[in-house]
Amino acid sequence: MKPDESIALVTGANKGIGKEIARQLAGKGVIVLVGARDPTRGKQAVADLRSKALPVQFLPLDVADQQSVDQAVSDIESQYGRLDILVNNAGIAVDWGPPSEAEIDAVRSTYETNVFGVFRVTKAMLPLLRKSKAARIVNVSSALGSVTLTADPNGPFRGRSMLMAYCSSKSALNMLTLQFAGELASSGIKVNAVTPGYVATDMNQHQGTRTVEQGAATPVRLALLPDDGPTGGFFSDEGVVPW
Protein backbone atom coordinates (compact mmCIF):
# COMPACT_ATOMS: atom_id res chain seq x y z
CA MET A 1 0.00 0.00 0.00
CA LYS A 2 1.34 3.44 -0.90
CA PRO A 3 1.36 5.97 1.96
CA ASP A 4 -0.85 8.42 0.05
CA GLU A 5 -3.56 5.90 -0.79
CA SER A 6 -6.87 6.42 0.99
CA ILE A 7 -8.64 3.49 2.62
CA ALA A 8 -12.44 3.49 2.70
CA LEU A 9 -15.00 1.19 4.27
CA VAL A 10 -18.52 1.17 2.83
CA THR A 11 -21.05 -0.85 4.81
CA GLY A 12 -23.87 -2.67 3.06
CA ALA A 13 -21.91 -2.39 -0.18
CA ASN A 14 -22.80 -5.64 -1.93
CA LYS A 15 -25.57 -3.99 -3.99
CA GLY A 16 -27.51 -0.82 -4.69
CA ILE A 17 -26.27 2.56 -3.51
CA GLY A 18 -23.54 1.03 -1.37
CA LYS A 19 -21.99 -0.85 -4.26
CA GLU A 20 -22.17 2.26 -6.43
CA ILE A 21 -20.50 4.37 -3.73
CA ALA A 22 -17.75 1.75 -3.62
CA ARG A 23 -17.44 1.84 -7.41
CA GLN A 24 -17.20 5.61 -7.59
CA LEU A 25 -14.68 5.87 -4.76
CA ALA A 26 -12.54 3.10 -6.21
CA GLY A 27 -12.72 4.85 -9.57
CA LYS A 28 -10.99 7.80 -7.92
CA GLY A 29 -8.14 5.61 -6.72
CA VAL A 30 -9.43 4.92 -3.21
CA ILE A 31 -8.89 1.40 -1.87
CA VAL A 32 -12.43 0.36 -0.92
CA LEU A 33 -13.37 -2.31 1.57
CA VAL A 34 -16.75 -3.67 0.51
CA GLY A 35 -18.54 -4.44 3.76
CA ALA A 36 -21.31 -7.03 3.56
CA ARG A 37 -22.82 -9.56 5.94
CA ASP A 38 -23.52 -12.09 3.15
CA PRO A 39 -20.16 -13.52 2.01
CA THR A 40 -21.53 -14.82 -1.28
CA ARG A 41 -23.06 -11.52 -2.31
CA GLY A 42 -20.11 -9.55 -1.00
CA LYS A 43 -17.61 -11.60 -2.97
CA GLN A 44 -19.78 -11.39 -6.07
CA ALA A 45 -19.86 -7.62 -5.80
CA VAL A 46 -16.09 -7.49 -5.38
CA ALA A 47 -15.56 -9.79 -8.35
CA ASP A 48 -17.75 -7.53 -10.48
CA LEU A 49 -15.90 -4.38 -9.41
CA ARG A 50 -12.50 -6.01 -9.84
CA SER A 51 -13.45 -6.99 -13.38
CA LYS A 52 -13.40 -3.24 -14.01
CA ALA A 53 -9.86 -3.04 -12.58
CA LEU A 54 -11.04 -1.28 -9.43
CA PRO A 55 -9.11 -1.55 -6.12
CA VAL A 56 -11.70 -3.21 -3.89
CA GLN A 57 -11.63 -5.91 -1.25
CA PHE A 58 -14.38 -7.87 0.49
CA LEU A 59 -14.71 -7.34 4.22
CA PRO A 60 -17.16 -9.56 6.14
CA LEU A 61 -19.23 -7.19 8.26
CA ASP A 62 -22.60 -7.45 9.97
CA VAL A 63 -23.26 -4.05 11.54
CA ALA A 64 -25.74 -5.62 13.98
CA ASP A 65 -23.12 -8.03 15.37
CA GLN A 66 -20.46 -6.64 17.72
CA GLN A 67 -18.16 -9.61 17.21
CA SER A 68 -18.32 -9.12 13.45
CA VAL A 69 -17.55 -5.42 13.81
CA ASP A 70 -14.64 -6.09 16.16
CA GLN A 71 -13.19 -8.60 13.72
CA ALA A 72 -13.50 -6.07 10.90
CA VAL A 73 -11.57 -3.53 12.95
CA SER A 74 -8.85 -6.11 13.61
CA ASP A 75 -8.66 -7.01 9.91
CA ILE A 76 -8.36 -3.38 8.81
CA GLU A 77 -5.78 -2.58 11.48
CA SER A 78 -3.58 -5.55 10.62
CA GLN A 79 -3.66 -4.89 6.87
CA TYR A 80 -3.77 -1.10 6.62
CA GLY A 81 -3.17 0.35 10.08
CA ARG A 82 -5.76 3.10 9.62
CA LEU A 83 -9.06 4.05 8.00
CA ASP A 84 -9.56 7.30 6.06
CA ILE A 85 -13.21 7.09 5.03
CA LEU A 86 -16.20 5.42 6.67
CA VAL A 87 -19.49 5.38 4.77
CA ASN A 88 -22.28 4.05 6.97
CA ASN A 89 -24.61 2.93 4.20
CA ALA A 90 -26.14 -0.30 5.54
CA GLY A 91 -29.81 0.18 6.28
CA ILE A 92 -33.18 -1.58 6.15
CA ALA A 93 -36.84 -0.66 5.76
CA VAL A 94 -39.31 -3.34 6.78
CA ASP A 95 -42.38 -1.47 8.08
CA TRP A 96 -44.53 -0.51 5.11
CA GLY A 97 -47.76 0.36 6.94
CA PRO A 98 -49.02 3.07 9.31
CA PRO A 99 -47.49 3.40 12.81
CA SER A 100 -50.41 1.67 14.53
CA GLU A 101 -49.79 -1.46 12.49
CA ALA A 102 -46.03 -1.62 13.03
CA GLU A 103 -44.73 -4.70 14.82
CA ILE A 104 -42.38 -4.06 17.72
CA ASP A 105 -39.90 -6.59 16.34
CA ALA A 106 -39.80 -4.70 13.04
CA VAL A 107 -39.15 -1.43 14.84
CA ARG A 108 -36.44 -3.02 16.95
CA SER A 109 -34.68 -4.64 13.99
CA THR A 110 -34.83 -1.38 12.02
CA TYR A 111 -33.14 0.53 14.83
CA GLU A 112 -30.63 -2.26 15.35
CA THR A 113 -29.30 -1.74 11.83
CA ASN A 114 -30.06 1.91 11.03
CA VAL A 115 -29.09 3.45 14.38
CA PHE A 116 -27.27 1.04 16.67
CA GLY A 117 -25.41 -0.43 13.70
CA VAL A 118 -24.06 2.98 12.70
CA PHE A 119 -23.14 3.78 16.29
CA ARG A 120 -21.50 0.38 16.76
CA VAL A 121 -19.40 0.64 13.61
CA THR A 122 -18.47 4.30 14.06
CA LYS A 123 -17.40 3.85 17.68
CA ALA A 124 -15.36 0.77 16.83
CA MET A 125 -13.66 2.36 13.82
CA LEU A 126 -12.77 5.65 15.53
CA PRO A 127 -9.29 4.56 16.69
CA LEU A 128 -8.44 3.73 13.06
CA LEU A 129 -10.04 6.93 11.77
CA ARG A 130 -8.02 8.99 14.24
CA LYS A 131 -4.86 7.64 12.61
CA SER A 132 -5.86 9.25 9.31
CA LYS A 133 -4.63 12.70 8.33
CA ALA A 134 -8.13 13.77 7.29
CA ALA A 135 -10.79 11.19 8.10
CA ARG A 136 -14.34 11.49 6.80
CA ILE A 137 -17.51 9.83 8.08
CA VAL A 138 -20.61 9.82 5.88
CA ASN A 139 -23.94 8.58 7.21
CA VAL A 140 -26.48 7.66 4.54
CA SER A 141 -29.75 9.02 5.89
CA SER A 142 -32.99 10.02 4.16
CA ALA A 143 -35.09 13.13 3.68
CA LEU A 144 -37.84 11.03 5.28
CA GLY A 145 -35.90 11.47 8.53
CA SER A 146 -36.19 15.26 8.39
CA VAL A 147 -38.41 16.40 11.26
CA THR A 148 -38.64 19.85 9.69
CA LEU A 149 -39.92 18.58 6.35
CA THR A 150 -42.32 16.13 7.99
CA ALA A 151 -43.77 18.82 10.28
CA ASP A 152 -44.16 21.40 7.52
CA PRO A 153 -47.90 21.61 6.65
CA ASN A 154 -46.89 22.43 3.10
CA GLY A 155 -44.00 20.00 3.01
CA PRO A 156 -43.69 16.89 0.85
CA PHE A 157 -44.19 14.40 3.71
CA ARG A 158 -47.02 15.98 5.71
CA GLY A 159 -49.80 13.49 6.37
CA ARG A 160 -47.80 10.54 5.06
CA SER A 161 -47.71 8.47 8.24
CA MET A 162 -45.98 5.43 6.84
CA LEU A 163 -42.61 3.77 7.49
CA MET A 164 -42.58 4.98 11.10
CA ALA A 165 -39.65 2.78 12.13
CA TYR A 166 -37.57 3.69 9.08
CA CYS A 167 -38.32 7.43 9.22
CA SER A 168 -37.74 7.78 12.94
CA SER A 169 -34.56 5.70 12.73
CA LYS A 170 -33.19 8.14 10.15
CA SER A 171 -34.13 11.04 12.43
CA ALA A 172 -32.14 9.36 15.19
CA LEU A 173 -29.28 8.80 12.75
CA ASN A 174 -29.27 12.52 11.99
CA MET A 175 -28.86 13.35 15.68
CA LEU A 176 -26.13 10.74 15.97
CA THR A 177 -24.38 12.51 13.10
CA LEU A 178 -24.54 15.85 14.90
CA GLN A 179 -23.31 14.35 18.15
CA PHE A 180 -20.24 12.76 16.59
CA ALA A 181 -19.56 15.85 14.45
CA GLY A 182 -19.52 18.00 17.57
CA GLU A 183 -17.20 15.71 19.46
CA LEU A 184 -14.79 15.22 16.57
CA ALA A 185 -14.72 18.76 15.18
CA SER A 186 -11.41 19.64 16.83
CA SER A 187 -9.79 16.45 15.54
CA GLY A 188 -10.32 17.31 11.88
CA ILE A 189 -12.62 14.33 11.35
CA LYS A 190 -15.64 15.53 9.37
CA VAL A 191 -19.00 13.85 9.94
CA ASN A 192 -21.99 14.49 7.69
CA ALA A 193 -25.34 12.95 6.80
CA VAL A 194 -26.66 12.63 3.28
CA THR A 195 -29.92 11.78 1.58
CA PRO A 196 -29.40 10.04 -1.77
CA GLY A 197 -32.98 10.74 -2.82
CA TYR A 198 -35.60 8.26 -4.03
CA VAL A 199 -33.23 5.82 -5.70
CA ALA A 200 -34.43 2.68 -7.44
CA THR A 201 -33.16 -0.16 -5.22
CA ASP A 202 -34.34 -3.47 -3.79
CA MET A 203 -35.57 -1.57 -0.73
CA ASN A 204 -38.37 0.05 -2.74
CA GLN A 205 -38.81 -2.71 -5.33
CA HIS A 206 -36.95 -0.46 -7.80
CA GLN A 207 -39.76 2.07 -7.86
CA GLY A 208 -37.40 4.96 -7.16
CA THR A 209 -37.03 7.72 -9.70
CA ARG A 210 -33.26 8.18 -9.38
CA THR A 211 -30.40 5.95 -10.47
CA VAL A 212 -27.81 4.52 -8.10
CA GLU A 213 -25.22 6.63 -9.91
CA GLN A 214 -27.16 9.77 -8.98
CA GLY A 215 -27.76 8.58 -5.44
CA ALA A 216 -24.10 7.82 -4.81
CA ALA A 217 -22.71 11.11 -6.11
CA THR A 218 -23.18 13.24 -2.98
CA PRO A 219 -22.05 10.54 -0.51
CA VAL A 220 -18.86 10.23 -2.56
CA ARG A 221 -18.39 14.00 -2.59
CA LEU A 222 -18.76 14.14 1.19
CA ALA A 223 -16.34 11.23 1.58
CA LEU A 224 -13.70 13.23 -0.29
CA LEU A 225 -14.25 16.64 1.30
CA PRO A 226 -11.29 19.02 1.36
CA ASP A 227 -10.01 20.45 4.65
CA ASP A 228 -12.29 23.48 4.34
CA GLY A 229 -15.38 21.35 3.77
CA PRO A 230 -18.36 21.29 6.14
CA THR A 231 -19.01 19.04 9.10
CA GLY A 232 -22.20 18.39 11.01
CA GLY A 233 -24.41 18.93 7.97
CA PHE A 234 -27.24 17.15 6.18
CA PHE A 235 -26.99 17.29 2.40
CA SER A 236 -28.58 16.23 -0.86
CA ASP A 237 -27.24 16.86 -4.32
CA GLU A 238 -29.26 20.09 -4.29
CA GLY A 239 -27.61 21.44 -1.15
CA VAL A 240 -28.42 21.59 2.56
CA VAL A 241 -31.39 19.56 3.84
CA PRO A 242 -33.21 20.82 6.97
CA TRP A 243 -32.99 18.64 10.04
Image (tube, helix red, strand yellow):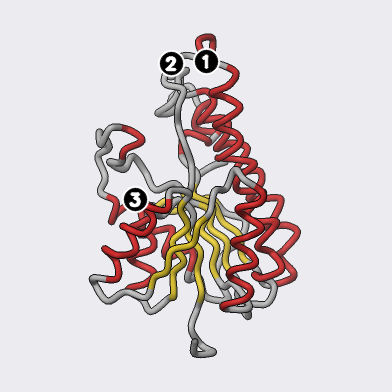
The amino acid type, in three-letter code, at marker 3 is: Lys
Task: Please tell me which residue lies in front, 40 or 202.
Answer: 40
Mark 3 burial class by Cα count in 10 Å: few <14, some 14-19, many 20+: some
Q: Residue furthest top?
A: 100
Query: Marks 2 and 1: in contact by CB < 8 Å?
Result: yes
Question: Disc 1 versus disc 2: distance between alpha carbons?
Answer: 7 Å
The amino acid type, in three-letter code, at marker 1 is: Ala
User: Disc 3 or 1, which lies upstream in sequence?
Assistant: 3
Residue 22, image x, y percentages: 38, 63
Q: Secondary structure at mark 2?
A: loop
Task: Please tell me which residue lies in front, 136 or 54.
Answer: 54
User: Disc 1 or 2, which lies upstream in sequence?
Assistant: 2
Tell me what residue is drawn at x 34 percent, y 50 percent.
15
Q: Quadrant of residue 155?
A: top left
Mark 2 burial class by Cα count in 10 Å: few <14, some 14-19, many 20+: some
The amino acid type, in three-letter code, at marker 2 is: Gly
> Residue at label 1?
102
> Residue at label 3?
15
> Residue at label 2?
97
Tell me what residue is drawn at x 43 percent, y 64 percent.
58
Tell me what residue is drawn at x 24 percent, y 70 percent.
51
Residue 112, image x, y percentages: 61, 36
Task: Pick the quarter of the image with the C terminus.
Answer: top right
Mark 1 burial class by Cα count in 10 Å: few <14, some 14-19, many 20+: some
